[in-house]
Amino acid sequence: MTSVKIIPEKNVIDDGFLDLIGREFVTHEKGLAEWLKNAADAILAAGLTSGSETIFLHFTDQRRGKSLVFECIDFVGMTLEEIERAFKPWGRLSWSDKSRGTYGGYGIGGKFYMRQMFASSYLITFSQGLLSVFGFDQNHAYGYAQGHKNQSMDPQEALSFAGIEPFADLAGVKEALVKGKRGFSVVRGIGPRGVGRPIDVESLCGRLRNDPQAQGPLKSHRVCVMHNTMVVLERLRPRSIPRKPGFERPWVRRIPSVIPPVNPEGGIVRRSQDAKSAGALRLFVSSESLIQRGKMASLNRIDFLGSDGIIASYRLDELGVDVPWGEFIFGECILSRLDHSKEHSGKKTRDRLIDSPESRALLRWVGAQVTDFSRMIQSKASEQ
């Protein structure tokens, strides 16, 4: 047989494939959560204190000759090298060392949201006296804006170019920025799909407050919401769920190191490599039905947490749980860092665990614990 040697070439990615993957990010609350995570990651990577930094979400209604606009603004900034390494590539399936322990790290969600859900979109970023604009045109093609790739620019001129001088004043960083000690990034989406006129900012922020991926940034960072340059929320926070009296503390169950498999013929499912717990399940009960309170319905779920935040979420009905008090229950399943196997990870979209014997066994175990918790609530209610 003739010996053949392949000369490697770069992969060619068809736009149809990107359209297929991008369908995971077709709601604005999901996309905005990705923008918030990216901004929060930038703040953490720069070594800045999250509590003292402000991230802005700015929504601008359609005006004469201008489209609706969504913006996410932070005062960190990216270099050209960071754009090329972290923002530009598609489908990166591993973390960089700098990304570990942060909210994201894969760099796909925010970019797909820009591509899929706006007529056009772009990133304006300024760092170390250099400005770059990188984004998507009306045909979903991406690249740098003409004349704005690593362009040398005075900080004050850069602020005016981006149109964010009032935001720098509100964040208290304008002086540092003008002196060259700070940068900024503006992710701007023009012509958002499926959005009415005027923008219903209250409803949009209500859905964002409930989104699993927004929980971390909203808890630890000051996210200020503005509408047509006016402040409508000084700080957007996750929705708080009032606890049922007598159940103020969580009901905790340790995840066993070995779990019975869903398929008995498959053998045992090992969640950790020794006798130590593979994590913990924490369940809570609301004082009112989450389902009947429409704005809270999406919180009737179990979030799965890894070392870098929420990696998957399942509504109780998706766990096959249909029990008394089920619509009052919510919680979190904290996976131990002992579990390093890729098969135990969440998908890159962070909405589901990767399907495997381990994940199926874990989900069934969680459902069984929810059933036990429901019985305990029912028993206490009957006693009362």
Image: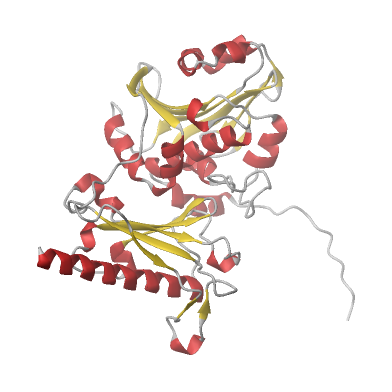
Give the quadrant of the N terminus.
bottom right
Q: Is residue 144 left or right of residue 199?
A: right
Give percent across and percent down for residue 181. Answer: 65, 18
Does residue 200 appear anywhere in the picture? Answer: no
| Residue at (29% x, 42% y) in the render | 240
**Left or right: 381 as drawn, with respect to 219:** left
Q: Is residue 155 above or below residue 318?
A: above
Residue at 54%, 66% (x, y): give it: 344
Farthest residue, direction bottom: 265
Q: Quadrant of the C terminus?
A: bottom left
Marker count (numbered): 0
From the top left corner, tell me how far across and down residue 222 is, in percent.
43, 29
| Residue 150 appears in the rendering | yes
Query: Where is 210 relative to 203, above or below?
Result: below
| Residue 25, x across and y down, in percent | 44, 47
Residue at x 39% of width, y 73% of height: 365
Q: In the current view of this chain or complex, which residue is farthest to the right?
A: 2
Residue 239 vs residue 10: left or right?
Answer: left
User: Foreground: 341 or 372?
Assistant: 372
Foreground: 51 or 32? 51
How is the structure coloured here? secondary structure
The residue closer to the viewer here, 203 or 175, is: 175
Q: Where, by quadrant of the figure, is residue 352 drawn?
A: bottom left
Question: Where does the image place residue 233, in percent across and percent down from the top left?
Answer: 33, 25
Residue 7 located left or right of residue 287: right
